[in-house]
Structures are given as structure tokens and as C-alpha cells.
Image (tube, rainbow, N blue to C red):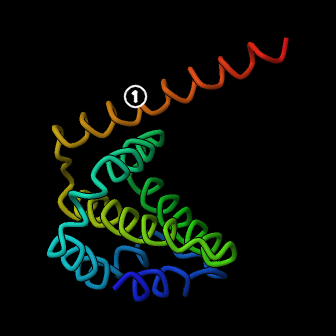
Amino acid sequence: MIKEISDFLHSFKNKTLEVEDIVKLKEKINQFANDIKVQSFDKEYEENFLTILGYSYRLDNLSQRIFYTFQEAVYAIDLDILMKNEDSKRLNSIVYILVLEQLIKYYETNSEDEELKQKALETYKAIEERKAKENKKYHMYQY
């Protein structure tokens, strides 16, 4: 299943799709997302999912969130393939499909799950704060 997902995303490597074209991929994305949920990978990678979903909220416009998240997914998978990083390819395949599924659902229903949104924003903020702390430590050693 991971290979199918990564191959699917990687097939768009040299293509730029409009949001409407990405939304048309809904059936395939939903199928992959359902397979992921059946195997409980959504639970295993929940923090990663929330982080990427939270990161997508840096853009106010939902269409931009879908477009850039899709582009990031393709880029991440391409990089994983080039680096032969199977663990990262697995993680990115799972997480990006789940995030894309969620964003497409929002796009089609014109509504967002406010509780999930808040959880994603809090998770992303916590990750960013942790990174800032690490960077601050690193910069202290430079002086």
C-alpha cells in the first residue's frame, strides 16, 4: 500500500495541477486514506498528521492549502525516493494522504472541523516552539 501511495504521488513529479484537478483525485486519495485507517496507521502517525495539517493553516485560503500541500507531498516523496529513505517515504505517504483527504473534504463541504483545526494548530505550535528552543540553544553556543 505504501508503494502504491508513493508511486501515485510521485507520478505528479513534473506536473503542476490546479486545485480542481487535485480535488478530482478525491476517489483515489479517499481509497488510500481508508486503507491507512483500516491498518490504524492514522493513529500511529497522528502527531505527524496534526503537524502537517497545522502547517497548512499558514495559508488562509483553502485552495492554496490544497495546492501547496499537494506540491509538498510530491516533493517530499521525490526526495525520499532520491535519498532512498524508506522510513520517511512511509511517513510522508501516510501523513500527506490523510491531510489531503481532510483538506479536500473541507473544500467540498465548505466547512471545517473546528476541534480538529484547533488540535492541529496547537500541535504545530508546540513543534515550532520546541524547534525554536533548540535553535536558541544552538545559537548560544555560537557566541
> Seen from this angle, which residue lies furthest front?
141
Identified at 52% across, 74% down, the residue is 86
Identified at 42% across, 64% down, the residue is 91
Amino acid carrying label 1: it is: Ala
Identified at 30% across, 85% down, the residue is 28
Question: Badge 1 is on which residue?
Answer: 126
Where's residue 127, x and y in %? Answer: 45, 33
Where's residue 13, x and y in %? Answer: 62, 80
Foreground pick, 85 / 129: 85
Residue 60 occupies quadrant:
top left
User: In this rendering, would 11 be left or right of 45?
Assistant: right
Residue 131 occupies quadrant:
top right
Residue 8, relative to residue 124: is it above or below? below
Identified at 18% across, 76% down, the residue is 34
Location of the N terminus (image quadrant):
bottom left
| Crowding at mark 1 (Cα within 10 Å: few <14, some 14-19, many 20+) | few
Where's residue 73, x and y in %? Answer: 51, 66
Residue 137, relative to residue 16: is it above or below? above
Location of the C terminus (image quadrant):
top right
Total labels drawn: 1
Residue 50, relative to residue 19: is it above or below? above
Residue 132, relative to residue 109: is it above or below? above
